[in-house]
Image (tube, rainbow, N blue to C red):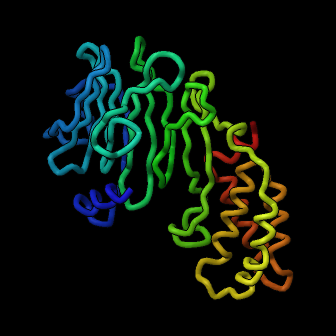
Amino acid sequence: MWKKVALLAIIFGVFTLSFPQSALASEADESDLCSKDIERIVEKKAGDYRIRISHDGAQICQRLEIFRQGQIVYREEGIDSHYSLGSDWDGHHKHFLMSLTGHGAQLVVSKWTGGAHCCNSLLIFDVRGEFRKIDEIYGGNYDLEIVDLDHDGIPEIRLLDDFLAYLFSSFAYSAKADVVLRYVNNHYLVAPELMKKPARLKALNAKIPRWRKLLRKHSDPEWPPSPFIQAMTDLIFTGNENLAFKLVDQVWPPDVPGKADFLKSYRTALVDSKYYSKFVGR
């Protein structure tokens, strides 16, 4: 992530705007957002396909293009967008073709929309036979990981849901949820079976006195205590939502104000999460 922040500082200082646009078009399309004066930076072949990432001279706008037999089949470009072949930003582009679906090979492109925080995503395409964009998977402030969690030969995608970013604390201390996505029926879905696990009640109970003390103290700017909110979030996203809200009742002293406001804000954020409803609904 630090590489992205450094790049931002060089290119655009601390203020950024992002206006992404996707389209199928010819190379001469006059509606392009990017400058015509582009400089090619990466070009790779994948069977009948050619993948090109290019940028304008100032590197403010980047463009992703995919060609088949000289004809463009996909184009996406944006002011302050950045693309990298593969699932990381190391610049080596070693693993941009992967077997992710159990059928053929898939092209993986990482996308970052600029800014010290937000937003990262993975673009996944079929590039064997008929071209198809499989999915664009949103990762928010964090990079996404491709990993075979159940060892069946078909990798899952693991990400951090940052639905609580900045809500009760600074970004560094904001709680986040571990989410796993699995390829099912031609696209990616939340995989509760790979997320659910028993609550570690003994470890949680040992921390309650400390959290109660911090709630009473109320002198820390990160309030309610960030580890308490993280524990609550971990419970919810491992299938223990009832225990999560019981934990709030156990931890929050009756004479300490703010519990109702906290719960209201937390539940509102939970509903706004891109992945929570898909987790509890499956």
Would residue 55 be found to the left or right of residue 149 on screen?
Answer: left
Image height of 222 relative to 180, above or below: below
Between residues 138 and 154, which one lies in front from this camera angle?
154
Q: Where, by quadrant of the figure, is residue 278 drawn? A: top right
Q: Position of residue 49 (x, y in %)?
A: 30, 18
Between residues 28 and 133, which one lies in front from this camera angle?
133
Image height of 181 relative to 164, above or below: above
Q: Where, by quadrant of the figure, is residue 7 drawn? A: bottom left
Between residues 176 and 13, which one lies in front from this camera angle?
176
Residue at image location 31% in from the left, 15% down from the top: 47
Q: Position of residue 208 (x, y in %)?
A: 78, 74
Image height of 199 relative to 187, above or below: below
Q: Position of residue 254 (x, y in %)?
A: 86, 81
Would residue 246 be found to the left or right of residue 34 on screen?
Answer: right
Image height of 232 relative to 128, above or below: below
Q: Where, by quadrant of the figure, is residue 96 drawn? A: top left
Between residues 177 and 52, which one lies in front from this camera angle?
177
Residue at image location 31% in from the left, 25% down from the top: 66
Q: Quadrant of the N terminus?
A: bottom left
Residue at image location 57% in from the left, 22% down from the top: 186
Q: Position of residue 133 (x, y in %)?
A: 45, 25
